[in-house]
């Protein structure tokens, strides 16, 4: 189990997200951004928009996913 923060994944806060794999952590971040946006949290709005952009343009988002996975792999 590894932990990354919302901030490490491009968000504005230090909420910790944990998972066994990078994909789990990325999913947890997506969920967190969706919930923050639904709750009217303005500070998470830009990161939420970026997340939606990653879904719409998965090929363009490859670099982001690669960086996130590398950051996860580098965690001890
Ligand atoms: Zn956050």
Image (spheres, rainbow, N blue to C red):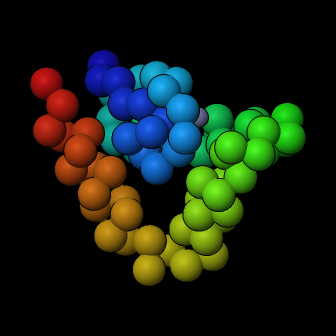
Which residue sits at x=49%, y=36%? 6
* Quarter of image, res 43: top right
Residue 65 spot, x, y in % from top left: 36, 59
- Vertical placement of 63 versus 1: above or below? below
Total number of numbered discs in the rendering: 0
Horizontal relation, residue 7 to residue 45: left or right: left
**For this rendering, which residue is in front, 26 or 20?**
26
**For this rendering, which residue is in front, 41 or 61?**
41
Horizontal relation, residue 9 to residue 73: left or right: right
Which residue sits at x=86%, y=41%? 40
- Vertical placement of 69 versus 52: above or below? above
Residue 47 spot, x, y in % from top left: 60, 54
* Quarter of image, res 64: bottom left
**For this rendering, which residue is in front, 65 or 38?**
38
Horizontal relation, residue 47 to residue 2: left or right: right
Residue 76 spot, x, y in % from top left: 13, 24
Can the viewer see residue 19 in this picture?
Answer: no
Which residue sits at x=28%, y=61%? 66
* Position of the N terminus by quadrant: top left
Q: Quadrant of ligand 1?
A: top right
Horizontal relation, residue 65 to residue 26: left or right: left
- Vertical placement of 50 versus 36: above or below? below
Can the viewer see residue 39 in this picture?
Answer: yes
């Amino acid at each position: 189990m590894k932990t990354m923060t919302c901030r490490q994944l491009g968000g504005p806060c230090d909420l910790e997200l944990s998972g066994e794999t990078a994909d789990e952590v990325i999913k947890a971040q997506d969920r967190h951004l969706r919930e923050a946006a639904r709750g009217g949290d303005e500070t998470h709005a830009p990161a939420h928009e970026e997340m939606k952009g990653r879904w719409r343009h998965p090929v363009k988002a490859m670099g982001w996913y690669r960086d996130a996975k590398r950051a996860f792999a580098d965690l001890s």
